[in-house]
Image (cartoon, rainbow, N blue to C red):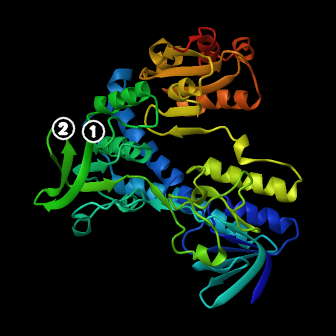
Amino acid sequence: MRRFDAIVIGAGQAGPPLARRLAVAGQSVAIIERKLFGGTCVNTGCIPTKTLIASARAAHVARSGANYGVTIPGPIGFDLARAKARADEVSGRSRRGVESSLRETPGCTVIQGHARFASHHTVTVGDDTLQAERIFINVGGRARIPALEGLPGIAYVTNSSILALDTVPHHLLVIGGGPVGLEFAQMYRRFGSDVTIVEMAPRLLAHEDLDVSNAVEAVLASEGIHVRVAAECVALESDRRGVSARLSCETGDRTELGTHVLLATGRVPNVDDLDLDRAGVNVDAHGFIAVDDFLRTNVPGIWALGECNGHGAFTHTAYNDFEIVAANLLDDERRKLSDRIPAYAIYIDPPLGHVGLTVAAARASGRPCLVGRRPMTNVGRAIEKGETQGFMQVIVDAETRRIVGATILGTGGDEAIQSLLYAMYAGATASTITHAVGIHPTVCELWPTVLGELHLLA
């Protein structure tokens, strides 16, 4: 029996900083990782995919050079093997940094292997048994594999395994019209693939407002991506040309052919092989570990952080989980999950940034709200760059005048949304922003203009 003050299971985005903080505070800590340090973000998520998206954008800009007076002789080629090597190096550098920082932290013991609960205070890793009064679970999630007829008989890729490709597919079928599916769809279209997206919902990004979904579909269609909505993939089978997807739909062809299939149909938490029942830890109806406002499970002394708790599948939410736990345990600061304002970006091009309420959610809340909107065709910075697709929109509580939501689909949208996110945390009113003097020419300088043209949300 090896005894520690704390055990951290998983070295994703919340586990390592928590392990380091606890160790620096004088506690003995064991952090257990069964595969790759850094979790999804570092290995199969943000870092490698956004590196590849940068390569895809470079190819897209090169092909559009003539519009800007840039003449490039000959056709623009693309070498996926070189782009992959660059992404692997960027990802590997980050992974090595996470691992070395843990191994170099005094009081922190790194253990590689598969952790399983033996009781609420005991974990086994192979033949080793570890015990601690506090255990923190940070095991992340993985791609959900749907139960499709014929799936076991075909080769398919997920968001993880597609990163191993070093040649461009002739025709990529993307099953799923959510953020992951759309990012890979545009990426591979810019790499040179024909791309078809199959989405069972009536529109892409079904959790967004309708006008956002429509604008995103228009962006993708403008690049030659074929989009099928209200079309459920019910079966896959091998075809002499690759893979055939059989669809359940009321309009359009009932089959789509491709050479490669990407399954982008959601995520599941990596909790099914932790033996949580031996510790008595509850999970919700979707398999995520149930936690309270302080990330505590139903079992005293056990916390769950990151994607496995179902309160955010993002690096920034996982890291904030660490901040909440550390603040309460080490800093005597009462921080809560409910303090967090929902915010995210989807890295299509132009990017989609969102914070707070959607228009649909604002209407459903029943409180009077104001909305302001401006198309990117009326944003000087977008015009200068020749990137005028999309719009920017903000929602304000009519009584308090505080900003409660905002969306931008447009150039620099992933950065521009941050200014309103910080304003919302600061409790700024619309008047505060309208009185601010922004820098010209930028996208953010238009937020005061949008907030100065509010009207009642019907």
**Number of other residues with Cα within 10 Å of mark 2, as a class: few under 14, some 14 to 19, many 20 or more:** few
Identity, as a three-letter code, of the amino acid under mark 2: Glu
Identity, as a three-letter code, of the amino acid under mark 1: Ala
Question: At numbered mark 1, what does the secondary structure look like: helix, strand or loop?
Answer: loop
Query: Can residue 252 be seen here?
Result: yes
Contact (Cβ within 8 Å) of mark 2 with mark 1: yes
Q: Where in the figure is residue 30, as x and y percent of width and height?
A: 73, 75
The extreme front residue here reads 366
Q: What's the residue at 30%, 44% (across, down)?
A: 200
Horizontal side of residue 370 vs 24, given as left or right: left
Q: Disc 2 versus disc 1: distance between alpha carbons?
A: 8 Å
Q: Is residue 146 above or below residue 123?
A: above
Q: Which mark is residue 250?
A: 2
Question: At numbered mark 2, what does the secondary structure look like: helix, strand or loop?
Answer: loop
- N-terminal label among 2 and 1: 1
Horizontal side of residue 186 vs 269, given as left or right: left
Q: Where in the figure is residue 256, as x and y percent of width and height?
A: 17, 47
Q: Which mark is residue 451?
A: none
Quarter of the figure with the N terminus: bottom right
Q: Is residue 6 above or below residue 375?
A: below
Q: Which sits in the foreground, 49 or 295? A: 295
Quarter occupied by residue 298: bottom right
Q: Where in the figure is residue 201, as x and y percent of width and height?
A: 33, 40
The residue at which mark 1 appears reads as 230
Q: What's the residue at 33%, 46% (across, down)?
A: 188
